[in-house]
Image (cartoon, rainbow, N blue to C red):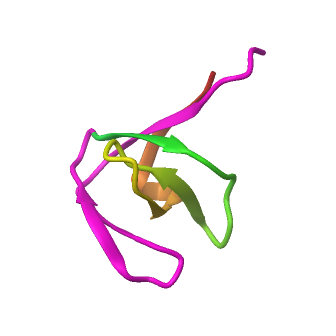
Amino acid sequence: MQKGLTTGTLNRNRTIRDENHNAIGVASKGAKVVVLTGLKNGKYKVQLPNGKTGYVDKDKVDAVNYA
């Protein structure tokens, strides 16, 4: 397996929150995100297309692909 990015697609509109649970933005259904960490407390740490990072529930991310 080549080293690369792990990506996923949001399966519904989501408010993305930081580690302090503050809203940092909204990502639309179908948005591509980079998954930065594995699951922790049922959430992935993700990077949004605008470069911000936050957390999203695992059941809100489809097709996590390991590149």
Describe residue 8's horizontal placement relative to residue 10 as left or right: right
Q: Is residue 40 magenta?
A: no
Q: Is residue 2 above or below residue 40?
A: above
Where is residue 7? Give x, y as percent.
51, 34
* Residue visible at 66% across and 52% down in the picture: 37
Residue shown at the point (74%, 15%) measured from the top left? 2
Pinpoint residue 58: horizontal percent, then vertical percent: 52, 57
| Residue 15 left/right relative to 67 | left
Give the farthest residue toward the right: 1
Which residue is the extreme one toward the front? 51
Quarter where residue 22 is shown: bottom left
Using the image, determine if residue 65 lies above or below residue 35: above
Magenta segment, which residues?
1-30
33 relative to 26, above or below:
above
Which of the two residues, 62 or 51, is positioned nearer the viewer here? 51
Q: Position of residue 46 (x, y in %)?
A: 50, 52
Give the left or right position of residue 55, taking residue 4 as reference.
left
